[in-house]
Every structure is written in structure tokens, then in C-alpha cells.
Image (cartoon, rainbow, N blue to C red):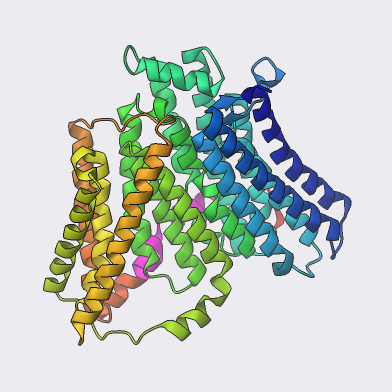
Amino acid sequence: MPPSSIAQFMLLTPLALVAAAAVSVAEPGSKPTRVLLASLVATTTSFLLGIGAAVLVAVQGATTSQMIGIGDVGLSFRLDALSVVMVLLVSFIGLTVVAFSRNYLDGDPRQGSFVGALCLTLAAVLLLVTAGNLFQLVGAWIGTSLALHRLLVFYPERRGAVIAARKKFLTARLGDACLIAAAVLLASAFGSSDIASILEAAERSAQTTIPWGAAVAAFLMAVAALLKSAQFPMHGWLPEVMETPTPVSALLHAGVINAGGFLVIRFADVMVLSAASLHLLALVGGFTALFGGVVMLTQPSVKASLAWSTTAQMGFMLLQCGLGAFSVAILHIVAHALYKAHAFLSSGSIVEVTRATAAPAASDGPRAGGVLAGFVLALALYAGIGWSFGLLERENAAVLTLGAIVVMGLAVPIALSLRGEGVAGVVVRVVAGVGGATVAYFVLQSFVAWLMMPVLPPVPEPGVLGLTIMGLAVISFAAVTAMQLIVRVWASTALGVAARIHVANGFYANLLFNRLIGADKRLLAHPFP
């Protein structure tokens, strides 16, 4: 059997999940035994088929199934390194979330309906990441948003959840319009709706003449990705959907929110045809990463802090895409998804864990000298380990820029260890831990770059504006990192307390959006726009 025919078996993944959702409709009640069993079977089937797809790609390379439909309208499945990684990630998280929901909503009269909606959302996401043609891609993109919307308003009596879902709904429709227009332009520019054919044609166009439609489509896809991934200034809905059940938060923050990054990475060959599109991703993503990271530090709620963390992480992931480091962005998506799924599903016990393991707080933060020493030690670690891997000799400016930002993250624990008594032993342990994390980062980065080599274009060489953006990113992250460390000294002062209030409210960026959508009591009666 040819690989293209085997790829058609991927249709079983969404079909199994849709079947489980159908069972939830046929079996209402407070003890939906068949629904829970069907959902576990469906998610397990999806994960096993993902493993089979990985073996197929490893043995025979990338392939696209034959179209199931009429003309350019129908279903086809693209199996390559990127789609296989995403299928395994989504199906594993889906299996975990569905299993968690068995106990989380036990006794809820609408548990079956909830699990069915989960399965429907997972089916849409799997159709998206395996899409072999533009029609399926756009349909699954829209379907994912609509299926998730019902989960966000699972408790329609909760005012906050309804307002956040309304904002997300309107933002998603803007993203849908951008993606539809981009799909039409791509099909017109390259004369095909087959994604593999489009990517091959885009790769050839990079060496010749770039169709104007492709450049405009790249820009529209960048906008769609920014809207899908809750980037500033349309970010407000993401931190506000915390009134949804915890499994929804886990699925959203670990899976669905990554759709924007996946879109950019899937069409990387098209994106590199438009420098303006990459610059837009880098600027907006970089600013959102800094903005979300600062606000996250001031949140008193565990889930609110995790939500702002997701906003920041999605910004950093799109910054990576904007710099052309697509393989690094894939590593970021996988690592963040696994971490955030665990964080949300275990958020109920985080208070007890913190109380049991937290050390007494220091009276003040590190001095300026400690901050400088932290940066120097982190830079030395990164440079030494990077040189031993040979990466610093062959990587270009984009990856080195991201490496410099990684140094900022490494500097924080080192600087915080350079205070109090018994510094030497603490610093040695912290430096050893940071060094181990750096080694793991380089190993994983090298592995993902090798794995994605047949799928992704090489990192583009930046122009003057690109280099300027990279320099601005490094300076900005360095400044925020230093502020994060030094601010501990004056956080308890009157100025620090006042500033914390404004930061914790996200500088009130959501107020205008709330007014535009009419965030009043009328929404309670009309949760679905």
C-alpha cells in the first residue's frame, strides 16, 4: 500500500473523536458511562495512530493522502515531521485531559455533554494540524474556535466567563477573515490549494520572483496568528477565561492557543517571502512577551498567573517565528504545552505544595553587583556550553539573539542566589542546575533542528531592520530582567505598591475592548453571539 493511502488512515483520529461526541448526545445523564469510555477509546486511538504516523514518516518520508471530496473541496492529510509532532502532542494532552475530566466533573449532570465538547474540539485541532489542503485548514481553524467557545461558556451563569468568551469570539472572527483571505490569495498565487504544492512553489519563488499575492497572504497569516494566540492588544480574553472548568483551561493553554504558531510554522516557506510579516510577528510577539511576563509577576491567583504566563510564552514563541527560528519555536510549543497542561491540572494542589516546600523569603533582593555578576556567570555558561556544541560558530544572528534572551532567564536564579549567608554552596548548586538546563536546551534544540530540516526553510539572513529589531529585543529583555531583580528592593515602598496595582491590572488595556463589546448584564442572556 503506498504511503499516500496509509496517510488516509489519519481520518480515523477525528472520526473516533466525533463518534465519542455523538455518544454524548445520545446518552444524556449524570453518569455517562458510555461517553467516558468512548472518549478514552477515541483519544487512545488518536495517540496510537500518531505513533504509527511517526513510524511511517521516519521510514518513508513526508506524504499527503489523496483528496476525499470533490475537486479542491474535501479532506486530505499531510504527514511530515511537523504534523506528526503536533498529532502526538495534541492526542497525548487530549488523552490526559479527558482522563482527568472523569473525576473532575464526576456527578455533574452535564458531564457527558462536557466530555463530548472536549472530543469535538480535539477532533477539530487534529484536522487542523494534519490538513493537507487549504479548505480543510480553514475549516478546521474555524471549527476549533467554535467548538472551544461552547466549552468557555459551559457555565453560562458566570458573568466573567461569558464576557471573556464574547471577546474571544469577536477576536477569532477577525482572525478567521484574515485566514480566509490569505487562503484565497495563496491558491490564486500558486494555482493550487494543496499545501505541499504551495510550500514547494514558495520555496522556488524565494529564488526567483515573489508573487504579490503570496506576500500579502503571509502578512494576513501573521495577523491571524497574532489574533489566535492572544497577542497585545487583543490579549485580554485569555487571562479572563479562568472561570471555565480546569480541563478547558488545560486544553486551551496547552493546545488550542498554539494554533497561531502552528500556522506560521506550517507556512514558513511562505512567511520568509515577506520580511514585513516576520517583522510584525517579532515586534508584537516580543512586546507581548515582555508585557505579559511583567503582569504575570503581580497576579495573586495561581490560574491568573498561569494565564498571563501563556500570553507571554505565546509572544516569545511568535518572536522566535518572526526571527525565522522556526525549529526553536516548535521546541517552545512542545515544552510549553506539556508544562502548562501539568500546571493547570495540578493547580488545585499548588498552594499545599508551596506551603510544604517554600523557603523563608529573603528580606531584600540582590544588589546591583549581584545582578551584574548573575549576567556575567549566565553569559559564561551559555557561551561555554554553546561553544562545546559548536553552535556559536555556525548559528546566525537570529538564533544568537534568542540565545542572549535565554541568558537573561539564566541570570535570574544565579543573581538571586548571590545574597544572604552561605552564598558559596547555594551558588554552586544553582549554577550546576542552570548549567544542566542549558545543556538540555542545546541538546533539544539541535535535535529539533535536525528533525525539522526536511520541513522548514533555513533561518533567513536579517536586513538592517531585522538586526535593529534583534538589538531592541535583547536590550528590552535585559532591562526587564534587571528590573525584575532590582524591583524586589523597593516593592514594599509606597511607589512600589502603587505601581504593582497598575501592573496587576494589565495597565487597563482591556477597558476599551470591554466597552466596545458592551460588557454588561445583557451578555448573560445571550452567551452565544
Percent x, y of residue 142: 61, 37
Percent x, y of residue 495: 25, 76
Q: Nearer the viewer, residue 371 or 182?
A: 371
Can see residue 484?
A: no
Prevailing secondary structure of the magenta residues: helix
Q: Is residue 227 magenta?
A: no
Q: Nearer the viewer, residue 493 or 512?
A: 493
Q: Quadrant of the N terminus?
A: top right
Compared with 239, 460 (above or below) is: above
Percent x, y of residue 362: 27, 84
Q: Residue at x 18, y 80 (%)?
A: 424
Q: How many marks?
A: 0
Q: Kindly give the residue lying farthest to the front in the view shown.
A: 59
457 relative to 237 in the view: left or right: left
Compared with 280, 209 (above or below) is: above
Compared with 44, 4 (above or below) is: above
Q: Residue at x 53, y 55 (%)?
A: 253
Q: Residue 478's image quarter?
A: bottom left
150 relative to 272 in the view: left or right: right
Can see residue 354?
A: yes
Q: Residue at x 31, y 30 (%)?
A: 276
197 relative to 117 in the view: left or right: left
492 relative to 231 in the view: left or right: left
Percent x, y of residue 287: 32, 50
Magenta range is 501-521
Q: Residue at x 38, y 22 (%)?
A: 215
Q: Is residue 506 magenta?
A: yes
Q: Kindly give the residue lying farthest to the left in the view shown.
A: 369
Compared with 196, 472 (above or below) is: below
